[in-house]
Amino acid sequence: MKTKKTLLAPMLAVVALVSGLSLGVVAEAEKAKPFSHMADYPVPYEDLFRPSPYTNIRISPDGKHFAAGKVRDDGLVDGLIIERKTMDVKSILQLKGAVGVSGIRWANDERVLFSFSSKSATSEGAGSGGIAGMNIDGSRKDIIWQGTHDYGGGEGGSLAGRIDDEHYRVMVFPSGTSTKFPHLYVYKMNIYTGKTTRIARSPIRMGRPIFNKEKQITHWVGGLPSSFKHTVVASKGSNGDWEEQIFDQSKGVFQPMGWTRDQKHMLFMDTVEASTKGLYRVNMESGEKELLYRHPKVDFDAPLFDEDGHIWGAVINYDYPEVVYVDDENHFAQTHKRLQGTFPNHYIQIVNRTRDGNEWVVHVRDDRHPGKYYLYNQFDGALKFLANQGEWIDRTSVPATHPFRFNARDGMEINGYLTLPVNKQAKDLPLIVLPHGGPHGPRDYWGYNKERIIFANAGYAVMHVNYRGSGGYGRDFMYDWYGHWGLEMQDDLTDATYWAINAGIADEDRICMYGASYGGYATLMGLVKEPDLYKCGIGYVGVYDLNTMMKSGDVGLRKAGIDYMKEALGATEEKRRAQSSTPHVDRIKSPVFLVQGKRDVRAHWDHYTGMRDALRNQDHRLETLVAPRAAHGAREDDSRMEIYCRMIDFMDRHIGDRKPMDAPEESCVPEDALGLEYEYFKGVPRG
């Protein structure tokens, strides 16, 4: 029987909670309702954790149907095919067990391919996946690919482009990637039967293929198994063999990205001629190069491709995201320009279009809303609403994010983002300094960031800083600061804090630092180096001892990881000790909150126990929270809701409206959830 659903009024999914008893000691009848102390927040706390009801909306090539992911109450995603004319759900793909849809592609007018992944029952996060197929009427519904088992089993894979109406390419990633960079394999897969035929093997490790219009591989771009910072480009020589070029990324790379529509030119990314990424067009017969675009301060972050793999633009993130058009005649570029005029100050993503190029599914978002899907008609300019990914969110109640820049103590320009609570003047606010993880490669962006919104929604200003060593600001900005953890990289965070104080935004007596992974490292180093500046600190799955990192965790399982650590952390034990926080806890004055996943192999459990024990030995004021099933950060919503609630409670007591010696909040465990392992050590106030 056909079930009628409409994308115009999406049903809201409810967060699934793990059943069990709370670890709290308060009698059941006296327990406070979960998150009751957050009832007066501009956005209800639990609403920030609601999953988007619909995701991955795609229109069919003939424009007669939509495919979409529908989020269930347990957080997993089913695949839907919806008849456009009636908005009836024609068929549903619901996979057995803890498995949900993660990606959707129309293979032809009648068939949809669904990528899926599994949710492990013993650890938080997603496991291995595969590919399923379903016709619009629900027929021929089956898992068609779940590993080839040609390489020991368990290998992952992903769809890598359409070949024809019955075949797709699948890129296969063999198992064993934790110990070496594998060769990658390209298979031709029948989308109905799942039958696969291997058509290519990368001549280099971790190779990404580049195809021409004849669907032949002309180049591979990959890396070296022994190095974290080398790029290898393989191209066909005159004798038909693959010839390799090896680039040291710290000195510059010139690598192909794809063919242009005329197939006479290729687009290349360049960091040889200048530090930031430049986009060049190269005549492959004459070798003549033309620079299409280079920003003097930042890299382009994401090249934008049409359905044939041709680049029409790139995204620049200096302050706000900006799309630069490098092929003005491309249909995608022309459409995006028109949409950008309709939605100024928003980020617009073209999702897919009909075969005739007339109708387009687009996703529109900004810093105060996760986004909405629309259907754009190229012929008459009509724009029809499809689905709201945060229907329950009033964007006027969501904190806004603003870019800022300042000059560090040595004059270097540093960029960041400041999220301010609503209904409060940007003056003398309690401030959370939130350094990103990584540190080398990642960076912070403007946009809808749930973590910064959670804290700003609780009344705090939240500062993200793209300190030196971050990615996105050119090769020199990143590579020149390897080995400078806790030094100039830390000074940038300190200087940013003083910038906020001197600007009158932050109250100098109410500043806390919080971060995860490297952000946890920076937090505890901030407390060590600036014991009077930060009134509290939260380390989440953090690295606290660089010598511990050299011997514990998964980074050292491959030679490239060992080489990375020697360059990033320091080559000697003495240097690493000097730039670690655990050996210097005697300098810390402020209360500390440590949050850790017990299964973490990146920031290993040894970091947590080392820091915890060192603080205990000092009889330091300390709180701890352990997620038994989490690895490098909790993924399940009940865990995340408790973690952030306890973080806010900790901040409320130290830089908020409560007193440091107030008892911790008892209503942070979601209803029916077992609760994480929380401990409170009153300790002795210091300083």
Image (cartoon, grey):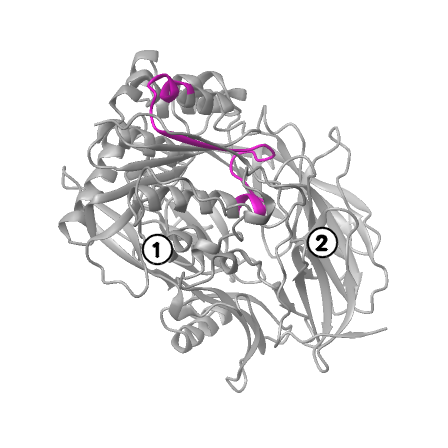
Q: Based on the picture, tell me whether residue 627 belongs to the magenta stretch.
A: yes
Write down the quadrant of residue 593 in the picture. Answer: top left
Q: 161 or 124, which is in the foreground? A: 124
Q: Is residue 664 left or right of residue 118?
A: left
Ranked by sequence position, the earlier of labels 2 and 1 is 2
Start and end of the magenta stretch?
A: 613-640
Label 2 secondary element? strand
Counting from the top left corner in percent of width and height, residue 29 is at: 59, 49
For the residue marked with disc 1, what is the amino acid? Answer: Asn
Give me the residue at 27% from left, 63% from top.
424
The residue that disc 2 covers is 168
Q: CA distance from mark 2 to mark 1?
A: 33 Å
Q: Based on the picture, tell me whether residue 397 belongs to the magenta stretch.
A: no
Counting from the top left corner in percent of width and height, residue 152 is at: 75, 28
Counting from the top left corner in percent of width and height, residue 239 is at: 59, 35
Q: Quadrant of the C terminus?
A: top left
Other-residue count near label 1 (Cα within 10 Å), few / some / many at <14 / 14–19 / ≥20 = many
Q: What label does residue 317 carry, if any?
A: 1
Please tell me whether mark 2 or mark 1 is closer to you in this view. 1
Other-residue count near label 2 (Cα within 10 Å), few / some / many at <14 / 14–19 / ≥20 = many
Q: Please say if 596 is above or below 652.
A: above
